[in-house]
Amino acid sequence: MLWTFLALLLGGILKGATGAGAPIIAVPVMAILVNVPFAIAILSVPNLVSNLWQGWQHRADHLDLRFTVKFALAGAFGAGLGTYMLANLPDEALLVGVAISVFAYIAFRLARPHWVLPFAAAQRLALPVGTVAGMLQGAAGVSAPVSITFLNALRTDRSAFVATISAFFAAMAVVQIPLLTLYGFLTWERFLWSCVAIVPLASGMPIGAALARRISKEIFDKVILALLALVALRLLSDAVL
């Protein structure tokens, strides 16, 4: 439980600093400690609450409301498909899926740090990209390789990014929570723990916001990427050995 608390706190710090990404740290760490379905179930309520909170704070900052709605609805649909995969794939496949998702995120960030996607192209890609990201979120608990990379490529300001990604994550959580309950992943006991998990996640968000003002974005990104690489390697070893 201590390690789970620390994972959620670190996830909150990352979310507070960047506006997104709590599952990037929390899900892989909890997957190592317990399993992927447990990690996704425990993060379901904090995901919904934290993203509704940030989405409300930045409700006037949407880059384009129609784009946000399209992207969010596609994510919700994909999350439903991904949760079905979660219920039907073996644990080893899920661990590998999380690890590959994390490595894909790291690789893209290193290979194309300054790539810019035109907004007109992003509007056309919102539905397919949102669906794939939602599937990753539902099945592996980590949509960042697709969702965050996609929005980062638009090079919007932080407020517009947070407004869009918060709506996306909140829409997925609205679909995930009832489906996780239906498939038996989110039991009453886990629901209560998921509510408790709001505390460390929310506690980390102000810390992340403060760090973002004091540490350069480049240094913060490198530290996070190095941590993610170690976690992903551990996931692969647990799946193979």
Image (cartoon, rainbow, N blue to C red):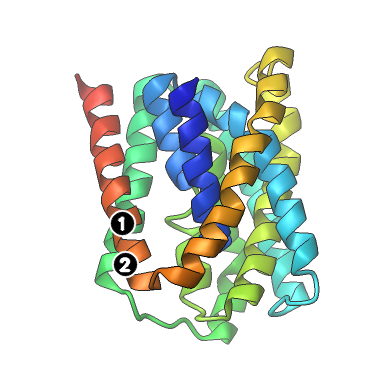
Q: Label 2 sits on what residue type? A: Ile
Q: Is residue 201 above or below residue 146?
A: above
Q: Position of residue 144 (x, y in %)?
A: 47, 54
Mark 1 nearby-residue class (10 Å; few <14, some 14–19, many ≥20): few
Q: Is residue 200 above or below residue 229?
A: above
Disc 1 and disc 2: Cα gap in Å? 6 Å
Q: Secondary structure under badge 2?
A: helix
Q: Where is residue 199 in the image (x, y as percent from the top left)?
A: 66, 36
As drawn, is 96 to the left or to the right of 6? left
Query: Is residue 129 something that shows in the picture?
Result: no
Foreground residue, 4 or 211?
211
Q: Are marks 1 and 2 in contact (CB under 8 Å)?
A: yes
Q: Secondary structure under badge 1?
A: helix
Mark 2 nearby-residue class (10 Å; few <14, some 14–19, many ≥20): few
The residue that label 1 is drawn on is 223
Query: Is residue 71 something that shows in the picture?
Result: yes
